[in-house]
Amino acid sequence: MNRKLKLQIQTLLLSFIISQRLWADDAWLRSAENQVFQFMQSGACTNWADGSKNQSSAYLWIPENCKKIRGLLILCANVPEHRLVGHPTIRAACAANDLGIVWCVPSFMNFRKSQETSIDNAHDYKTSTTFLQELLDGLAKESGYAEVASAPWLPIGESGHLLMVDALVEFHTERCIAGVWLKNNHLPPKNRTVPALVAFGSAQEWSQTQSDIRTNWNNIGKAYQGILDQRKQNPNWPSSYLIDGTSGHFDCSEKLTKFLADYIDTVAKARLAPNGTLRQIKLENGFLADMPVPGHENHPVTDFAKTVPDMRGVPWFFDRASAENAQSFARINWHAETQIPGFADASGKILPFNFNGISSLTPEYEADGITFTLRGVMLDKLPEQFTNSGVNLAKTSGTPTLEWLCGPVKPLGDNKFQIALDRSWPSSACYIAARQPGTDEIRNSVQPCGIKVQKNNSGLVQKITFDPISDVPLGTKSIKLSAKSDSGLPVRFFVRSGPAVIHGDELVFTPIPPRSRMPLTVTVGAWQWGRGGMAPVQTANVVELTFSIVSK
Protein backbone atom coordinates (compact mmCIF):
# COMPACT_ATOMS: atom_id res chain seq x y z
CA MET A 1 0.00 0.00 0.00
CA ASN A 2 1.49 3.37 -1.01
CA ARG A 3 1.91 6.12 1.57
CA LYS A 4 -0.66 8.50 0.06
CA LEU A 5 -3.39 5.85 0.04
CA LYS A 6 -2.50 4.85 3.61
CA LEU A 7 -2.86 8.44 4.81
CA GLN A 8 -6.21 8.77 3.04
CA ILE A 9 -7.47 5.61 4.72
CA GLN A 10 -6.24 6.83 8.12
CA THR A 11 -8.00 10.17 7.62
CA LEU A 12 -11.28 8.52 6.58
CA LEU A 13 -11.10 6.07 9.49
CA LEU A 14 -10.46 8.81 12.00
CA SER A 15 -13.28 10.95 10.62
CA PHE A 16 -15.62 7.95 10.81
CA ILE A 17 -14.68 7.28 14.43
CA ILE A 18 -15.25 10.91 15.33
CA SER A 19 -18.59 11.05 13.51
CA GLN A 20 -19.78 7.98 15.42
CA ARG A 21 -18.83 9.56 18.75
CA LEU A 22 -20.43 12.94 18.10
CA TRP A 23 -24.03 11.79 18.34
CA ALA A 24 -23.42 10.76 21.95
CA ASP A 25 -20.85 13.17 23.34
CA ASP A 26 -18.18 15.27 21.70
CA ALA A 27 -16.69 16.41 25.02
CA TRP A 28 -14.07 13.64 24.75
CA LEU A 29 -12.15 15.93 22.38
CA ARG A 30 -12.41 18.98 24.59
CA SER A 31 -9.26 18.93 26.65
CA ALA A 32 -5.69 19.98 25.99
CA GLU A 33 -4.29 17.13 28.04
CA ASN A 34 -1.60 15.23 26.13
CA GLN A 35 -1.51 17.28 22.95
CA VAL A 36 1.81 16.26 21.37
CA PHE A 37 4.28 18.86 20.10
CA GLN A 38 7.65 17.24 19.45
CA PHE A 39 9.73 20.44 19.26
CA MET A 40 9.95 23.83 20.96
CA GLN A 41 11.79 27.08 20.34
CA SER A 42 11.68 30.03 22.75
CA GLY A 43 12.97 33.53 22.22
CA ALA A 44 12.55 37.23 22.92
CA CYS A 45 11.92 40.05 20.49
CA THR A 46 13.73 43.26 21.38
CA ASN A 47 13.06 45.26 18.21
CA TRP A 48 9.82 46.94 19.21
CA ALA A 49 9.79 50.72 18.87
CA ASP A 50 8.78 51.20 22.51
CA GLY A 51 11.69 49.11 23.79
CA SER A 52 9.53 46.28 25.14
CA LYS A 53 10.69 42.67 25.10
CA ASN A 54 8.18 40.05 24.01
CA GLN A 55 8.83 36.47 25.10
CA SER A 56 7.34 33.70 22.98
CA SER A 57 7.54 29.93 22.72
CA ALA A 58 6.73 28.23 19.42
CA TYR A 59 5.72 24.57 19.57
CA LEU A 60 5.96 22.41 16.46
CA TRP A 61 4.02 19.25 15.65
CA ILE A 62 5.16 17.22 12.66
CA PRO A 63 2.99 14.32 11.41
CA GLU A 64 4.49 11.07 12.59
CA ASN A 65 5.07 9.70 9.06
CA CYS A 66 6.08 12.97 7.40
CA LYS A 67 9.33 12.87 5.44
CA LYS A 68 9.21 16.49 4.26
CA ILE A 69 7.15 19.44 5.50
CA ARG A 70 5.27 21.15 2.65
CA GLY A 71 3.55 23.84 4.71
CA LEU A 72 2.81 25.07 8.23
CA LEU A 73 -0.38 25.99 10.05
CA ILE A 74 0.44 29.03 12.21
CA LEU A 75 -1.69 29.69 15.31
CA CYS A 76 -1.35 31.54 18.62
CA ALA A 77 -3.13 31.41 21.96
CA ASN A 78 -6.66 32.77 21.84
CA VAL A 79 -9.72 30.61 22.58
CA PRO A 80 -10.49 27.98 19.88
CA GLU A 81 -6.85 27.66 18.80
CA HIS A 82 -5.94 25.66 21.93
CA ARG A 83 -8.35 22.94 20.88
CA LEU A 84 -7.80 23.17 17.14
CA VAL A 85 -4.02 22.61 17.30
CA GLY A 86 -4.52 19.16 18.82
CA HIS A 87 -7.84 18.15 17.29
CA PRO A 88 -7.64 14.75 15.53
CA THR A 89 -9.59 15.95 12.49
CA ILE A 90 -7.31 18.94 11.97
CA ARG A 91 -4.22 16.80 12.45
CA ALA A 92 -5.51 14.18 10.03
CA ALA A 93 -5.93 16.86 7.34
CA CYS A 94 -2.40 18.06 8.04
CA ALA A 95 -0.96 14.54 7.93
CA ALA A 96 -2.62 13.90 4.57
CA ASN A 97 -0.83 16.96 3.13
CA ASP A 98 2.49 16.93 5.04
CA LEU A 99 1.61 20.08 6.96
CA GLY A 100 3.12 20.85 10.35
CA ILE A 101 1.41 22.86 13.09
CA VAL A 102 3.15 25.74 14.86
CA TRP A 103 1.40 27.00 18.01
CA CYS A 104 2.86 30.05 19.73
CA VAL A 105 2.10 30.60 23.41
CA PRO A 106 2.94 33.24 24.51
CA SER A 107 2.24 34.82 21.14
CA PHE A 108 4.93 36.23 18.85
CA MET A 109 2.58 39.14 18.07
CA ASN A 110 2.86 42.63 19.47
CA PHE A 111 -0.48 44.42 19.33
CA ARG A 112 0.85 47.93 19.86
CA LYS A 113 0.17 50.39 17.07
CA SER A 114 3.05 51.42 14.80
CA GLN A 115 3.50 54.43 12.55
CA GLU A 116 6.27 52.76 10.57
CA THR A 117 4.21 50.23 8.67
CA SER A 118 2.71 50.67 5.21
CA ILE A 119 -0.67 49.37 6.41
CA ASP A 120 -2.81 52.30 7.50
CA ASN A 121 -3.44 52.43 11.26
CA ALA A 122 -2.01 48.92 11.64
CA HIS A 123 -0.02 47.21 14.33
CA ASP A 124 3.69 46.48 14.03
CA TYR A 125 3.15 43.59 11.67
CA LYS A 126 6.61 43.71 10.15
CA THR A 127 8.45 43.23 13.45
CA SER A 128 6.01 40.52 14.52
CA THR A 129 6.53 38.48 11.37
CA THR A 130 10.30 38.92 11.62
CA PHE A 131 10.14 37.51 15.15
CA LEU A 132 8.08 34.57 13.90
CA GLN A 133 10.75 33.83 11.31
CA GLU A 134 13.41 33.78 14.03
CA LEU A 135 11.37 31.20 15.94
CA LEU A 136 10.88 29.11 12.81
CA ASP A 137 14.60 29.21 12.07
CA GLY A 138 15.20 27.78 15.52
CA LEU A 139 12.56 25.08 15.05
CA ALA A 140 14.13 24.09 11.72
CA LYS A 141 17.45 23.43 13.45
CA GLU A 142 15.89 21.80 16.51
CA SER A 143 13.65 19.45 14.53
CA GLY A 144 16.00 18.43 11.73
CA TYR A 145 13.38 19.52 9.19
CA ALA A 146 15.30 22.41 7.60
CA GLU A 147 12.34 23.31 5.37
CA VAL A 148 10.41 24.53 8.43
CA ALA A 149 12.35 27.79 8.02
CA SER A 150 11.00 28.40 4.51
CA ALA A 151 7.77 26.39 4.16
CA PRO A 152 4.58 28.23 3.13
CA TRP A 153 2.19 29.37 5.86
CA LEU A 154 -1.49 28.85 6.54
CA PRO A 155 -2.27 31.24 9.43
CA ILE A 156 -5.46 30.73 11.49
CA GLY A 157 -6.63 33.22 14.09
CA GLU A 158 -9.53 34.25 16.30
CA SER A 159 -10.26 37.48 18.19
CA GLY A 160 -7.03 39.47 18.67
CA HIS A 161 -5.13 37.02 16.52
CA LEU A 162 -7.21 37.85 13.51
CA LEU A 163 -4.53 40.54 13.31
CA MET A 164 -1.85 37.85 13.24
CA VAL A 165 -3.45 36.43 10.10
CA ASP A 166 -3.54 39.96 8.70
CA ALA A 167 0.16 40.38 9.43
CA LEU A 168 1.26 37.24 7.60
CA VAL A 169 -1.07 37.77 4.64
CA GLU A 170 -0.17 41.44 4.19
CA PHE A 171 3.59 41.23 4.69
CA HIS A 172 4.28 37.77 3.25
CA THR A 173 1.64 37.39 0.56
CA GLU A 174 3.93 35.25 -1.56
CA ARG A 175 4.32 32.73 1.25
CA CYS A 176 0.70 32.27 2.38
CA ILE A 177 -1.20 29.19 1.25
CA ALA A 178 -4.36 30.88 2.57
CA GLY A 179 -5.61 32.80 5.58
CA VAL A 180 -8.36 31.74 7.99
CA TRP A 181 -10.20 34.33 10.10
CA LEU A 182 -12.45 32.72 12.73
CA LYS A 183 -15.70 34.02 14.26
CA ASN A 184 -15.41 37.78 13.67
CA ASN A 185 -16.62 39.47 10.49
CA HIS A 186 -13.05 40.43 9.66
CA LEU A 187 -11.17 40.77 6.37
CA PRO A 188 -7.49 41.61 5.81
CA PRO A 189 -6.82 45.35 5.49
CA LYS A 190 -5.77 45.36 1.84
CA ASN A 191 -4.82 41.98 0.41
CA ARG A 192 -7.38 40.59 -2.03
CA THR A 193 -5.30 37.84 -3.65
CA VAL A 194 -4.48 35.25 -0.96
CA PRO A 195 -7.24 32.62 -0.62
CA ALA A 196 -9.36 33.43 2.42
CA LEU A 197 -11.85 31.69 4.68
CA VAL A 198 -13.86 33.88 7.04
CA ALA A 199 -16.20 32.17 9.53
CA PHE A 200 -18.49 34.69 11.23
CA GLY A 201 -20.28 33.85 14.48
CA SER A 202 -23.40 35.99 14.46
CA ALA A 203 -24.21 35.71 18.19
CA GLN A 204 -21.41 37.83 19.63
CA GLU A 205 -21.25 37.38 23.42
CA TRP A 206 -18.87 40.24 24.20
CA SER A 207 -20.94 43.20 25.47
CA GLN A 208 -24.13 41.22 24.82
CA THR A 209 -25.76 42.88 27.83
CA GLN A 210 -25.81 46.26 26.09
CA SER A 211 -28.37 45.47 23.39
CA ASP A 212 -31.41 43.24 23.05
CA ILE A 213 -29.88 39.76 22.94
CA ARG A 214 -33.21 38.34 21.77
CA THR A 215 -32.76 39.96 18.36
CA ASN A 216 -29.19 41.22 17.98
CA TRP A 217 -27.92 37.81 16.83
CA ASN A 218 -29.96 37.97 13.63
CA ASN A 219 -29.29 41.58 12.67
CA ILE A 220 -26.49 40.65 10.27
CA GLY A 221 -27.56 42.47 7.12
CA LYS A 222 -24.96 45.23 7.41
CA ALA A 223 -22.13 42.83 8.28
CA TYR A 224 -22.92 40.51 5.38
CA GLN A 225 -23.41 43.39 2.96
CA GLY A 226 -19.84 44.48 3.63
CA ILE A 227 -18.63 41.04 2.56
CA LEU A 228 -20.77 41.14 -0.57
CA ASP A 229 -19.43 44.57 -1.46
CA GLN A 230 -15.88 43.25 -1.23
CA ARG A 231 -16.74 40.22 -3.35
CA LYS A 232 -18.32 42.46 -5.98
CA GLN A 233 -15.25 44.72 -6.04
CA ASN A 234 -12.88 41.71 -6.13
CA PRO A 235 -14.66 38.96 -8.10
CA ASN A 236 -11.37 37.13 -8.77
CA TRP A 237 -10.47 36.84 -5.08
CA PRO A 238 -10.85 33.18 -3.93
CA SER A 239 -12.56 34.15 -0.68
CA SER A 240 -14.87 31.72 1.09
CA TYR A 241 -17.29 32.76 3.81
CA LEU A 242 -19.80 31.27 6.18
CA ILE A 243 -22.14 32.62 8.84
CA ASP A 244 -22.44 30.41 11.92
CA GLY A 245 -25.98 31.29 12.91
CA THR A 246 -25.96 29.52 16.27
CA SER A 247 -22.77 30.67 17.98
CA GLY A 248 -20.61 33.71 18.45
CA HIS A 249 -17.11 34.79 19.34
CA PHE A 250 -15.75 31.91 21.43
CA ASP A 251 -17.13 28.62 20.20
CA CYS A 252 -15.77 26.37 17.46
CA SER A 253 -18.20 23.48 17.15
CA GLU A 254 -17.37 20.04 15.82
CA LYS A 255 -19.20 20.92 12.62
CA LEU A 256 -17.13 24.06 12.13
CA THR A 257 -13.93 22.19 13.00
CA LYS A 258 -14.73 19.61 10.32
CA PHE A 259 -15.38 22.39 7.80
CA LEU A 260 -12.04 23.95 8.69
CA ALA A 261 -10.24 20.61 8.31
CA ASP A 262 -11.81 20.09 4.89
CA TYR A 263 -10.74 23.59 3.87
CA ILE A 264 -7.16 22.93 4.99
CA ASP A 265 -7.12 19.73 2.97
CA THR A 266 -8.65 21.32 -0.12
CA VAL A 267 -6.59 24.51 -0.20
CA ALA A 268 -3.35 22.57 0.45
CA LYS A 269 -4.03 20.29 -2.49
CA ALA A 270 -4.94 23.23 -4.71
CA ARG A 271 -2.02 25.49 -3.76
CA LEU A 272 0.98 23.28 -2.99
CA ALA A 273 2.88 22.30 -6.13
CA PRO A 274 5.30 19.33 -6.06
CA ASN A 275 8.28 21.69 -6.46
CA GLY A 276 7.33 23.63 -3.33
CA THR A 277 5.87 26.68 -5.06
CA LEU A 278 2.34 28.00 -4.62
CA ARG A 279 -0.03 27.49 -7.53
CA GLN A 280 -2.62 30.04 -8.56
CA ILE A 281 -6.22 29.12 -7.82
CA LYS A 282 -8.36 28.34 -10.86
CA LEU A 283 -11.53 30.22 -9.99
CA GLU A 284 -13.38 28.77 -12.97
CA ASN A 285 -13.29 25.37 -11.24
CA GLY A 286 -15.04 26.74 -8.16
CA PHE A 287 -18.58 27.54 -7.07
CA LEU A 288 -20.50 30.55 -5.80
CA ALA A 289 -22.90 30.49 -2.88
CA ASP A 290 -24.96 33.22 -1.28
CA MET A 291 -25.56 32.74 2.44
CA PRO A 292 -29.24 32.05 3.32
CA VAL A 293 -29.80 34.94 5.73
CA PRO A 294 -32.79 37.31 5.72
CA GLY A 295 -33.10 38.83 2.24
CA HIS A 296 -30.93 36.13 0.63
CA GLU A 297 -33.02 32.98 1.05
CA ASN A 298 -33.28 30.27 -1.60
CA HIS A 299 -30.19 31.11 -3.63
CA PRO A 300 -28.77 27.84 -5.03
CA VAL A 301 -25.07 27.10 -5.45
CA THR A 302 -23.86 27.93 -8.95
CA ASP A 303 -20.78 27.15 -11.05
CA PHE A 304 -18.39 30.10 -11.16
CA ALA A 305 -17.63 29.49 -14.84
CA LYS A 306 -21.34 29.54 -15.73
CA THR A 307 -22.07 32.80 -13.91
CA VAL A 308 -21.87 36.16 -15.62
CA PRO A 309 -19.35 38.57 -14.05
CA ASP A 310 -22.05 40.87 -12.66
CA MET A 311 -23.41 37.97 -10.59
CA ARG A 312 -20.10 36.97 -8.97
CA GLY A 313 -20.42 39.15 -5.87
CA VAL A 314 -21.09 36.27 -3.44
CA PRO A 315 -18.66 33.95 -1.58
CA TRP A 316 -16.54 31.57 -3.67
CA PHE A 317 -15.78 27.94 -2.80
CA PHE A 318 -13.46 25.23 -4.11
CA ASP A 319 -16.25 22.71 -4.68
CA ARG A 320 -20.00 22.33 -4.55
CA ALA A 321 -19.95 20.28 -1.35
CA SER A 322 -18.14 22.95 0.65
CA ALA A 323 -20.41 25.66 -0.75
CA GLU A 324 -23.53 23.77 0.27
CA ASN A 325 -21.98 22.97 3.64
CA ALA A 326 -21.24 26.66 4.23
CA GLN A 327 -24.84 27.51 3.44
CA SER A 328 -26.04 24.92 5.96
CA PHE A 329 -24.54 26.91 8.85
CA ALA A 330 -26.87 29.82 8.13
CA ARG A 331 -29.91 27.80 7.08
CA ILE A 332 -31.78 28.34 10.33
CA ASN A 333 -34.91 30.14 11.44
CA TRP A 334 -33.62 33.69 11.76
CA HIS A 335 -36.80 34.66 13.58
CA ALA A 336 -36.51 31.94 16.23
CA GLU A 337 -36.83 32.82 19.90
CA THR A 338 -33.68 33.21 21.95
CA GLN A 339 -32.69 30.99 24.86
CA ILE A 340 -29.75 31.66 27.16
CA PRO A 341 -27.73 29.04 29.01
CA GLY A 342 -26.06 30.20 32.20
CA PHE A 343 -23.79 28.76 34.86
CA ALA A 344 -24.22 27.82 38.49
CA ASP A 345 -21.42 27.24 40.99
CA ALA A 346 -21.14 24.34 43.44
CA SER A 347 -23.67 25.95 45.80
CA GLY A 348 -26.21 26.41 43.03
CA LYS A 349 -25.77 30.17 42.73
CA ILE A 350 -26.22 31.42 39.18
CA LEU A 351 -23.19 33.38 38.06
CA PRO A 352 -23.70 36.98 36.92
CA PHE A 353 -22.71 38.13 33.43
CA ASN A 354 -20.18 40.59 34.77
CA PHE A 355 -17.11 39.97 32.61
CA ASN A 356 -17.70 42.17 29.55
CA GLY A 357 -21.15 40.62 29.24
CA ILE A 358 -20.25 37.00 29.97
CA SER A 359 -19.90 34.98 33.17
CA SER A 360 -16.68 34.44 35.08
CA LEU A 361 -15.92 32.00 37.90
CA THR A 362 -13.29 31.93 40.62
CA PRO A 363 -13.55 28.20 41.47
CA GLU A 364 -14.11 26.83 44.95
CA TYR A 365 -11.99 23.70 44.97
CA GLU A 366 -12.64 20.39 46.66
CA ALA A 367 -10.28 18.92 49.24
CA ASP A 368 -7.74 17.92 46.56
CA GLY A 369 -7.23 21.61 45.75
CA ILE A 370 -7.79 21.19 41.98
CA THR A 371 -11.32 19.82 41.40
CA PHE A 372 -14.30 22.16 41.10
CA THR A 373 -17.96 22.03 40.07
CA LEU A 374 -19.70 24.11 37.44
CA ARG A 375 -23.23 23.40 36.25
CA GLY A 376 -25.11 24.56 33.20
CA VAL A 377 -28.60 26.00 33.71
CA MET A 378 -31.25 27.47 31.45
CA LEU A 379 -32.34 30.97 32.37
CA ASP A 380 -36.06 31.75 32.76
CA LYS A 381 -35.69 35.51 32.36
CA LEU A 382 -33.20 38.00 31.00
CA PRO A 383 -30.77 38.69 33.87
CA GLU A 384 -30.60 42.08 35.51
CA GLN A 385 -27.38 43.02 33.69
CA PHE A 386 -29.13 42.75 30.29
CA THR A 387 -31.14 45.21 28.26
CA ASN A 388 -34.85 44.47 28.89
CA SER A 389 -33.96 42.49 32.03
CA GLY A 390 -36.79 40.49 33.55
CA VAL A 391 -38.39 39.57 30.23
CA ASN A 392 -39.33 35.89 29.96
CA LEU A 393 -37.08 33.69 27.84
CA ALA A 394 -37.88 30.68 25.73
CA LYS A 395 -35.98 27.50 26.50
CA THR A 396 -35.79 23.93 25.31
CA SER A 397 -35.90 21.00 27.69
CA GLY A 398 -32.85 19.45 29.26
CA THR A 399 -29.62 20.69 30.80
CA PRO A 400 -26.84 22.42 28.85
CA THR A 401 -23.74 20.41 28.04
CA LEU A 402 -20.51 21.85 29.43
CA GLU A 403 -17.43 21.79 27.21
CA TRP A 404 -13.80 22.80 27.60
CA LEU A 405 -12.83 25.62 25.24
CA CYS A 406 -9.28 26.52 26.24
CA GLY A 407 -6.87 26.81 29.13
CA PRO A 408 -5.29 24.55 31.77
CA VAL A 409 -8.36 22.66 32.99
CA LYS A 410 -9.90 19.36 31.94
CA PRO A 411 -13.47 17.98 32.14
CA LEU A 412 -14.07 15.00 34.42
CA GLY A 413 -17.79 14.56 33.67
CA ASP A 414 -20.80 15.07 35.97
CA ASN A 415 -20.18 18.85 36.08
CA LYS A 416 -16.69 18.33 37.49
CA PHE A 417 -13.54 20.00 36.19
CA GLN A 418 -9.95 19.86 37.32
CA ILE A 419 -6.85 22.01 37.05
CA ALA A 420 -4.53 20.38 34.50
CA LEU A 421 -1.45 22.45 33.82
CA ASP A 422 0.06 22.17 30.37
CA ARG A 423 2.46 24.09 28.13
CA SER A 424 -0.01 27.00 27.89
CA TRP A 425 0.20 27.85 31.59
CA PRO A 426 0.27 30.70 32.62
CA SER A 427 -0.03 32.39 29.22
CA SER A 428 -3.47 31.12 28.19
CA ALA A 429 -6.92 32.32 29.17
CA CYS A 430 -9.33 29.63 30.35
CA TYR A 431 -12.92 29.19 29.16
CA ILE A 432 -15.71 26.64 29.47
CA ALA A 433 -18.89 26.75 27.38
CA ALA A 434 -22.50 25.76 28.02
CA ARG A 435 -24.21 24.45 24.87
CA GLN A 436 -27.97 23.99 24.55
CA PRO A 437 -29.56 22.55 21.39
CA GLY A 438 -32.59 24.31 19.99
CA THR A 439 -35.58 23.54 17.80
CA ASP A 440 -37.02 25.08 14.65
CA GLU A 441 -38.62 27.76 16.83
CA ILE A 442 -35.92 28.23 19.50
CA ARG A 443 -32.34 29.00 18.54
CA ASN A 444 -29.39 26.78 19.46
CA SER A 445 -27.32 28.66 22.00
CA VAL A 446 -23.77 28.63 23.37
CA GLN A 447 -22.46 30.76 26.24
CA PRO A 448 -18.85 30.95 27.51
CA CYS A 449 -17.65 31.23 31.09
CA GLY A 450 -14.21 32.51 32.00
CA ILE A 451 -12.38 30.46 34.65
CA LYS A 452 -9.92 32.35 36.84
CA VAL A 453 -7.02 29.94 37.31
CA GLN A 454 -5.19 31.73 40.11
CA LYS A 455 -2.33 30.41 42.20
CA ASN A 456 -2.78 29.75 45.90
CA ASN A 457 -0.69 32.44 47.56
CA SER A 458 -1.55 31.81 51.20
CA GLY A 459 -0.37 29.20 53.65
CA LEU A 460 2.51 26.76 53.69
CA VAL A 461 5.21 27.22 51.05
CA GLN A 462 5.97 23.96 49.28
CA LYS A 463 8.85 22.84 47.09
CA ILE A 464 8.97 20.06 44.51
CA THR A 465 11.89 17.68 44.18
CA PHE A 466 11.91 16.10 40.72
CA ASP A 467 14.19 13.05 40.41
CA PRO A 468 16.62 13.37 37.48
CA ILE A 469 15.71 11.69 34.19
CA SER A 470 18.51 9.98 32.30
CA ASP A 471 18.72 10.02 28.52
CA VAL A 472 16.86 7.13 26.93
CA PRO A 473 17.66 5.13 23.78
CA LEU A 474 15.50 5.44 20.69
CA GLY A 475 12.75 2.83 20.84
CA THR A 476 12.07 3.18 24.58
CA LYS A 477 8.34 2.68 25.16
CA SER A 478 7.89 4.47 28.49
CA ILE A 479 9.56 5.51 31.73
CA LYS A 480 8.38 6.17 35.27
CA LEU A 481 8.53 9.71 36.63
CA SER A 482 9.24 10.44 40.27
CA ALA A 483 8.68 13.74 42.04
CA LYS A 484 7.68 14.72 45.57
CA SER A 485 6.55 17.83 47.34
CA ASP A 486 7.73 18.57 50.86
CA SER A 487 4.09 19.32 51.66
CA GLY A 488 3.24 15.65 51.15
CA LEU A 489 0.66 16.52 48.49
CA PRO A 490 0.71 14.49 45.25
CA VAL A 491 2.72 15.84 42.31
CA ARG A 492 1.42 15.76 38.73
CA PHE A 493 3.19 16.06 35.38
CA PHE A 494 2.84 17.49 31.88
CA VAL A 495 4.99 17.37 28.73
CA ARG A 496 6.13 20.78 27.54
CA SER A 497 7.75 19.45 24.38
CA GLY A 498 8.83 16.13 22.96
CA PRO A 499 7.22 13.03 21.46
CA ALA A 500 5.52 11.85 24.64
CA VAL A 501 2.33 11.94 26.72
CA ILE A 502 1.59 11.51 30.43
CA HIS A 503 -0.38 8.60 31.89
CA GLY A 504 -0.39 9.10 35.66
CA ASP A 505 3.28 9.01 36.69
CA GLU A 506 4.34 7.32 33.44
CA LEU A 507 5.86 9.09 30.45
CA VAL A 508 4.77 7.23 27.31
CA PHE A 509 6.67 7.94 24.09
CA THR A 510 4.88 8.49 20.79
CA PRO A 511 6.24 7.76 17.29
CA ILE A 512 9.02 10.06 16.13
CA PRO A 513 8.92 11.73 12.70
CA PRO A 514 11.49 10.01 10.46
CA ARG A 515 13.85 12.95 9.87
CA SER A 516 13.93 14.17 13.47
CA ARG A 517 17.33 15.41 14.57
CA MET A 518 18.92 13.22 17.22
CA PRO A 519 19.37 13.52 20.10
CA LEU A 520 15.77 14.69 20.49
CA THR A 521 15.01 16.88 23.51
CA VAL A 522 12.09 16.12 25.85
CA THR A 523 10.99 18.55 28.57
CA VAL A 524 8.65 17.47 31.37
CA GLY A 525 7.09 19.66 34.06
CA ALA A 526 6.17 18.62 37.61
CA TRP A 527 3.52 20.67 39.46
CA GLN A 528 1.53 20.79 42.66
CA TRP A 529 -1.35 23.28 42.94
CA GLY A 530 -1.66 23.48 46.72
CA ARG A 531 -5.00 24.05 48.47
CA GLY A 532 -7.10 26.53 50.38
CA GLY A 533 -9.22 25.83 53.43
CA MET A 534 -8.18 25.55 57.06
CA ALA A 535 -4.67 24.31 56.30
CA PRO A 536 -3.75 26.21 53.11
CA VAL A 537 -0.75 25.31 50.98
CA GLN A 538 0.68 27.61 48.32
CA THR A 539 1.04 26.62 44.67
CA ALA A 540 4.52 25.23 44.08
CA ASN A 541 6.80 26.55 41.40
CA VAL A 542 6.71 24.25 38.39
CA VAL A 543 9.93 22.23 38.12
CA GLU A 544 10.99 21.20 34.63
CA LEU A 545 13.52 18.58 33.63
CA THR A 546 15.01 18.08 30.20
CA PHE A 547 16.53 14.90 28.84
CA SER A 548 17.20 13.42 25.41
CA ILE A 549 16.14 10.50 23.26
CA VAL A 550 19.40 9.25 21.75
CA SER A 551 20.21 6.97 18.85
CA LYS A 552 21.12 3.44 19.83
Image: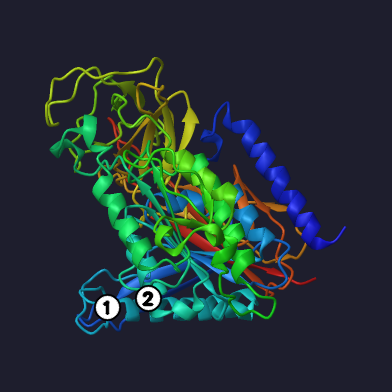
Residue nearest the viewer, comparing 437 with 113:
437
Relative height, residue 125 to residue 88 (above, below): below
Q: Position of residue 29 (x, y in %)?
A: 54, 40
Q: Residues within 10 Å of mark 2 (few under 14, many from 20)?
A: many
Q: In percent of the image, x 33 and y 81: which residue is there?
A: 127
Answer with left or right where residue 298 lies relative to residue 208.
Answer: right
Q: Which residue is mark 2?
A: 170
Q: Which residue is mark 1?
A: 119
Answer with left or right where residue 343 lies relative to residue 416.
Answer: left
Residue nearest the viewer, comparing 35 with 385:
385
Q: Position of residue 216 (x, y in %)?
A: 22, 37
Quadrant of the image occupied by residue 101: bottom right
The answer to whether any part of residue 166 appears in the image is yes
Q: In percent of the image, x 57 and y 26: which residue is there?
A: 24
Image disc number at residue 366: none
Residue nearest the viewer, comparing 253 with 112:
253
Q: In percent of the image, x 62 and y 74: which residue is there?
A: 143
Three-letter code for the amino acid on which mark 1 is drawn: Ile
Q: Secondary structure at mark 2?
A: helix
Asked whether the residues under the numbered discs 1 and 2 touch, taking CB atoms below 8 Å apart as contact, a structural biologist would say: yes
Three-letter code for the amino acid on which mark 2 is drawn: Glu
Distance between the alpha carbons at the discs numbered 1 and 2 = 8 Å
Answer with left or right where residue 72 lies relative to residue 50.
Answer: right
Q: Quadrant of the N terminus?
A: bottom right
Q: Position of residue 108 (x, y in %)?
A: 38, 70
